[in-house]
Image: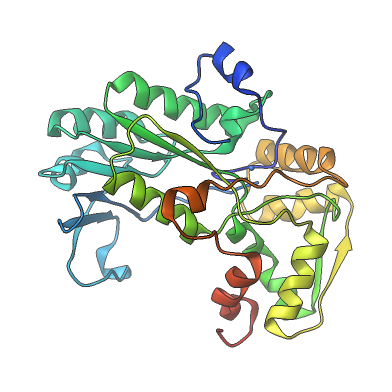
Amino acid sequence: MPPGHAGARHGSRDTQARRGRPRDTRNRWHRKRRCRHRGPTARRGGKVRVMTRDPSGRSFPGGVEVVTGDLTRPETLPEALSGADRAFLFPVFDGVDGFLAAARKAGLRHVVLLSSSTVTFPELGWVGGQHLRLERAVEASGLPRTFVRPGAFMTNDLVWAPQIIDGGVVRGVYGDAGLAPVDSRAIAAVVVRALLDERIGEAYMLTGPQSLTPVERVRITAQTIGRPLRFEEQPREQFQKEMLRHGMPAPVIAELMDGLAVRGGKNDPVLPTVEEVTGRPAFTYAQWVAHRAAAFGSAPA
């Protein structure tokens, strides 16, 4: 859900080839938030620059150069890209053309795009179509590229936080549908390796290390934060209304529910890509909950 999403099952290599998509070198609902920063960067030991809309509202490690900019305002991009030789590109759907034009002019020699596993689904849907459009734009630019295609994000479950804090009952749909969500820290680690090692032409499919249903994820959350919690199934119509209140587009909600429906009683494939690329195992769901314990009203682990 993404950029991963639970809209459908992964397509085969043959299906991808027929549609003219780049082949993966490794064998998701994800609500896209606008990224506050994108990182044109340099080689190992080199300088790192971050572009953000509001530098005063963010904190970054020492030694990171921070510039003001916005992917939807192309006039802000030349300063961010000046002197950079590679960049991480967050998928802001209406900002890619200006970025690519500025990147070509700046002489960028590697772009790592955060995409989505949905581009490999037999039926793309709205989410997959948007991400595939970005991938094709990057390919057409002629810039050397790497695509990072995560499935479901563990951070999607932060939507449960108010329910966990207020009463301990998590309501949702298709409690028996398996997903293999991935920690955003693992995604970031793959992006870093792709940038530093110049893994040009790769398309990395990412999952977490476990296929887990909502019921199982709620149980792990309860065990990790030390509070009794339970999952309660709710009607699709009620779930749709709640997600609309959270700001999720209606087509994305429909894809999410339909994708979960076909996963009922099934496990999601678990891929070894994170460990293969980074040399470290992907974070487990329990590790993610411990890391984000404060969001669920518990003391940080």
Quarter placement of the N terminus: top right
- Among all residues in the image, which is located at the extreme left? 83
Count of numbered circles in the view: 0
The residue at 67%/71% (across/down) is: 161
- Taking 91 as reference, is 286 left or right? right
- Among all residues in the image, which is located at the extreme top? 18
Residue 295 location in percent, x, y?
59, 76
Residue 282 location in percent, x, y?
54, 59
The residue at 69%/79% (across/down) is: 224
- The answer to whether one can see residue 70 in this image is no
- Taking 247 as reference, is 86 left or right? left
Q: Is residue 223 above or below residue 235?
A: below
Q: Is residue 276 above or below residue 201?
A: below
Q: Quadrant of residue 262?
A: top right
Residue 195 location in percent, x, y?
30, 45
Q: Quadrant of residue 206?
A: top right
The residue nearer to you, when weighing 243 against 217, is: 217
Q: Is residue 182 above or below residue 162?
A: above
The residue nearer to you, when weighing 183 against 227, is: 183
The residue at 89%/51% (across/down) is: 235
- The answer to whether one can see residue 60 in this image is yes
Residue 61 location in percent, x, y?
26, 71
How are the colours assigned in the image?
A: rainbow
Q: Is residue 251 above or below residue 19?
A: below
Q: Quadrant of residue 140?
A: top left
The residue nearer to you, when weighing 133 against 245, is: 133
Quarter placement of the C terminus: bottom right
